[in-house]
Structures are given as C-alpha cells and as structure tokens.
Image: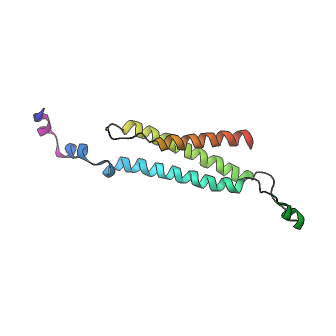
Amino acid sequence: MMESTKRMNPVQQDRRRKPRRKDSFYRFVLSVNFVSWLLLVVALVVFHFARPEMVTGLQTYWGIAGRETWSQRHVDALIVLLQVCLGMALVTMLLRSKRNRRREDSYGVNLFILASISLVSLLTINVSVV
C-alpha cells in the first residue's frame, strides 16, 4: 500500500488533501446556491408588487383608486423567477450528490428548504391566481 502512494503523482495527492473551501467545484456550487437564494428574495419583492393593493377607507374617502386584482405582468415574472430558483436548487442538489464523498460533507438541507418553498409557491400561485 505504501508503494502505491509513492507512485502517485504529487498533483493527485494534493487534490485529495485539498481543503474543501479551496475546491473550485465546491465554490461553484456555493455560488449557484447563493444566487438561487438571492432569486428567492427577488421573487418575494416581485410578489409584493404583484399582489392586490389594500384599499383603505381613507383612500376611498379621498377617491384614490387602488388595484384590487393581481398584476399579471408581475405574476408572470414571479412564476419565471420561482421556476428558475427551483431549477437551480435541483441542479445544485444533483451536483452535490455526485460530489459528496467525504465524511465531513453535508448534503445541504437548505437546498431542500429552497426547493420546497419554490415548489409550494409555484403550486399556490397556479391554483389561486391563474
């Protein structure tokens, strides 16, 4: 067994001892994960503008009109954002499952949470708005 390690290329030995934070694939997966969470935050902002406005008594008294229906333009953008977010979460889950081989590797519960939030949001929008 000692002989096989002696014959190994120094690059291969370094690859196995490389800390996870310095692995370019790991950084790529973290970047995709961060971008997908950022897309979810953007989707929440778009949701705020898509939903109907609450018309108060003061607005009615002063004659200020308020939108009482969903903004279709914002709903369409919201659906696209949530679909991209769900797709990125699923791709990241797949990439992590192919790469996780170390004992200290975690699977990423946050990706399951992100995918669940995106999926439930998409189903809810399709049932209630469209």
Left or right of 95, for residue 19: left
Query: Which quarter of the image is occupied by the N terminus?
Result: top left
Residue at image location 57% in from the left, 50% down from the top: 40
| Place of residue 120 in the rendered image (x, y in percent of width and height, measured from the top left) | 62, 40
Residue at image location 17% in from the left, 42% down from the top: 9
Left or right of 120, for residue 6: left
| Place of residue 60 in the rendered image (x, y in percent of width and height, measured from the top left) | 87, 62
Residue at image location 28% in from the left, 49% down from the top: 19
Magenta extent: 4-10
| Place of residue 81 in the rendered image (x, y in percent of width and height, measured from the top left) | 60, 49
Q: Looking at this view, is 47 or 84 the one in front?
A: 47
Left or right of 79, for residue 54: right
Q: Looking at this view, is 27 or 8 the one in front?
A: 27
> Residue furthest toward the top?
1
Left or right of 108, for residue 66: right
User: Against 84, is 61 above or below?
Assistant: below
- Identify the main secondary structure in magenta: helix
Q: Looking at this view, is 104 or 123 the one in front?
A: 104
Asked if the magenta segment contains residue 69, the reply would be no
Asked if the magenta segment contains residue 9, the reply would be yes
Q: How many marks?
A: 0
| Place of residue 102 in the rendered image (x, y in percent of width and height, measured from the top left) | 31, 38
Q: Looking at this view, is 71 or 109 the one in front?
A: 109
User: Against 120, is 75 above or below?
Assistant: below
